[in-house]
Amino acid sequence: MMTSPSPWLRRWPQALRPGATALDLACGSGRHVNLLAALGMEVTGVDRDAAALAPLRDLGEIIEADIEAGPWPLDGRQFDLVLVTNYLWRPLLPHIVGAVAPGGWLVYETFADGQQSVGRPTRADFLLQPGELLQACTGLQVVGYENGWVEEAGGVNGRYVQRVAAVRPALDGSPYPRHELP
């Protein structure tokens, strides 16, 4: 079980602005909710596990919802950062991309095809096919993409992943946000 923040998220510090809004979808026990709140972001965390969410209640808006079986709990809302790690439910991809505000970031990382050869998950339903995240990012400017085997420091076992960092063009039409680094 990973407890330290994702190196993929940390690779994009310009998406981690104090005062910006952040959505951590399928946040689990809150490894990213904690980081984002500590950076001064206004955090919304969503997960179905009430016990995992309980310690996070003081860090921001925490929503208990089964996003696979119930309605999308964030209709009409957009965020400066939408973060998804180690989670895939394909019917939600349009909602996830739609939740990125103009000038905002999507940082998404989850398991990819090949993972079944080294560990869990093993079901194709939970493994991205090559290019699948790129296809989901229609309307966003992709600034980073990886697909394949990764080994990262910190005791994380190697795994097959697909990850994307993408920005929704700002209202003035510029494809990249003009934010200062934190």
Image (cartoon, grey):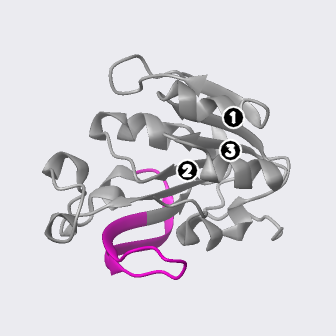
Q: Is residue 155 left or right of residue 24?
A: left
Q: Please tell me which residue lies in front, 23 or 151.
A: 151
Q: Is residue 139 left or right of residue 17?
A: left
Select label 3 or label 1 by which is in front. Answer: 1
Mark positioned earlier in the residue sequence (3 or 2): 3
Mark positioned earlier in the residue sequence (1 or 2): 1
Identify which amino acid the numbered label 3 is placed on. Answer: Ala
Question: How busy is the neighbourhood of tag 2: few (under 14 within 10 Å), some, or many (20 plus)?
Answer: many
Q: Which residue is mark 1?
A: 55
**Residue 143 on the magenta segment:** yes
At 60% from the left and 64% from the top, the residue drawn is: 4
Total number of numbered discs in the rendering: 3
Q: Is the N terminus in the top left, top right, bottom left or bottom right quadrant? A: bottom left
Mark positioned earlier in the residue sequence (3 or 1): 3
- Vertical comparison of 112 with 66: above or below: below
At 52% from the left and 21% from the top, the residue drawn is: 73
- Indicate the secondary structure of the residue bearing disc 1: helix
Q: Which residue is mark 3?
A: 22
Where are the magenta residues, as a range? 138-163
Question: Which residue extends farthest top?
Answer: 70
Dot 3 and dot 2 residues touching (CB under 8 Å) = yes
At 62% from the left and 36% from the top, the residue drawn is: 45
**Residue 38 on the magenta segment:** no
Identify which amino acid the numbered label 1 is placed on. Answer: Pro
Residue 67 image point, x, y percent: 41, 26
Residue 130 image point, x, y percent: 22, 66
Q: Quadrant of residue 72?
A: top left
Q: Which residue is mark 2?
A: 83
